[in-house]
Every structure is written in structure tokens, then in C-alpha cells.
Image (cartoon, rainbow, N blue to C red):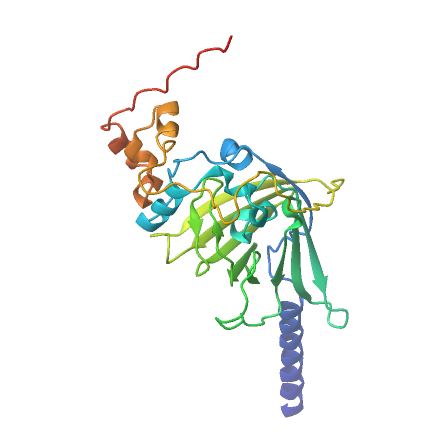
Amino acid sequence: MIQVLKKDRAAVLLVQLVLLAIVFVRPARGQEDPSGEWSPRFDEDQRERLAGAEIGDYLGLPINAAARLRADSWDATLVELPENQCRQHGSDYGWRGPSQLSIWKEVDRASQKVIAYHTHLSAYGAEQTIWMDGRPHPPDYAPHTWAGFSTGKWEGDILVVTTTHLKENWLGLNGVPRSDLATASAHIMRHGNWLTVAAITYDPVYLTEPLIRTVDFVYNPQQQMAPWPCESVDEVDRPAGVVPHHLPGTNPYLEEFGRRYGVPIEATRGGAETMYPEYQQKVQKMNIPPPLPKKTPSK
């Protein structure tokens, strides 16, 4: 009788070990590998993502007064400066650019575990490494880069990426700034041939709340990306040391966006309140600015 019980216990233990092995060896349920070639979809925010956000358009951005002042001082000819011509988008904003996307995984040959995912964007040839092996983020004094330092983990079927050590950059192509103290997260979600990325920026310097934006890609296995060689040149004969800018209160273009589309100027100034649907009720009580004068055809 005792021997039978011992055999039964041994059998139960063996079954438990087999089940544990299955749980720990197989991928977490629902994981969908984001690797592949992806083409961007511009069904949302097309004008902003392609031509760039218009000067003075801060709608839906949870910016504070410091960010607003810097954006108001921005001049579009800043991109003509040699140091800005090849300047990459930060990895938190890069998802939104007019870029094709390639994702591939790095696998340890001995264990066959995924060490990292790598991304490549066609714009500026920007690349990001997402470490999946549990390594810690570097100390605060480590160098900052355009891509930053990123680690990833699976939460169900969502690959969650945390990014630190970002260089100071912009949140849009109209001068809205993002500081080098900002951190970011990206939630990468694959649904068959569709990829959705929810990118979130946290900035204690310029944002009062997290900025959340989503982008979509479609699987394109035949996609080929050309190189992005970039060499800065002096495009404009500008005196040395001159940086295009507008002093506070002197930018003549800040109201053009509101007047062009009939949006109250107060609303165009942004802030966390403008992110939420109920703000529409407040907008309805605001004054609509006069439209821009029509251009007279030149003879």
C-alpha cells in the first residue's frame, strides 16, 4: 500500500513538473511578434504628420506656459541651420513621422530567447533597440541620444516599451518642445496584418499631463527602404551666430491657424483642457476670429 502511494505521488509530481515546463517554456498566451516590414497609414492627423503642424496650433497638447513661450519663439527657418538639417526625431515622436518601419528580433543562439527587438525608420535612418533581457536602465548621468535607452516586456499581447535618456527635441514640426528629462512608453499591438503603436510622452518640464498619440501601420512584406544619407550644407547666406527666432509677443503668424480654420484663438493655445471632449462645449461660447484676407492674384 505504501509503495502504491509513493508511485502515485511520483506520478503526480512528474505531471506537475511537465506542466510547469510547458508554462515557462512556451510564449505567453496571445503574444504576436511585431517583426516585419510595415507601411504607415495616415488616416488620422494626416496634415500634421506629413506637412507638419501649423505655427500656433497647440490644440490637444497638454503644454504649460514654458512650452508655449518656446513654441511662440520658434521660426520655421530654424531647420535651415546646418546643425538641424540632419536632426532626427526623438524615438517618442518618430513613430508619427512619414516613415516606413522595419522591426526585427535578436535571438540568443544558445537559449533561443529574444534578447532585443530592433526598429528602423526610413526617415533619417533612425534606429531603436528595445532590450528584452531584463537589463536595467543606465544611471542618470549616462549619455542621452535621439533614440534613448529602451527596455520592453510583454503584458498579455501588448509589447510595452519604456524609454529613458532622450535628447532634447520637439513634439511637433511647429516648435513645441520636449525636454531631455522626458521619458516615454510605447504600447505595440499587432492584430494580424495591422500594427498599432500608442506612444506616450511624460515630460516634467513642458507637459502638465502625459501626451498620448496613436499611429497605425499595415504589413508590407515586399517593402524596401532606400538609405537616408544626410549631409548638412549652408543653404542660406546668414551671418555667423544668427539663430532665427521671434522675441516674445512679436511672432506675427500665431493667429493664422485659428483664422484659417475658424478656431477660437484661445483654443489654439492648447493646454491639457483641450485634450478632452467636454472642451467642445467651452469652445462653442468663444469668439471666432475673423478669417484671413483672400490673396489677390498677381498680374
Say left or right for 140 vs 73: right
Residue drawn at x 33%, y 38% is: 269
Residue drawn at x 44%, y 43% is: 175
| Residue lying at the far front of the rendered structure | 239
Say left or right for 261 vs 159: left
Query: Picture quarter containing residue 149?
Result: bottom right
- Residue 152 seen in render: no
- Give coordinates of residue 141: x percent, y percent: 49, 71
273 to 113, vertically: above or below: above
- Give coordinates of residue 282: x percent, y percent: 24, 33
Residue drawn at x 42%, y 42% is: 245
| Residue lying at the far left of the rendered structure | 285
Q: Quadrant of the N terminus?
A: bottom right
- Give coordinates of residue 103: x percent, y percent: 67, 52
Query: Picture quarter containing residue 179?
Result: bottom left
Q: Nearer the viewer, residue 291 or 211?
A: 291
- Give coordinates of residue 177: x percent, y percent: 43, 49
Q: Nearer the viewer, residue 40 or 266?
A: 266
38 to 298, vertically: above or below: below
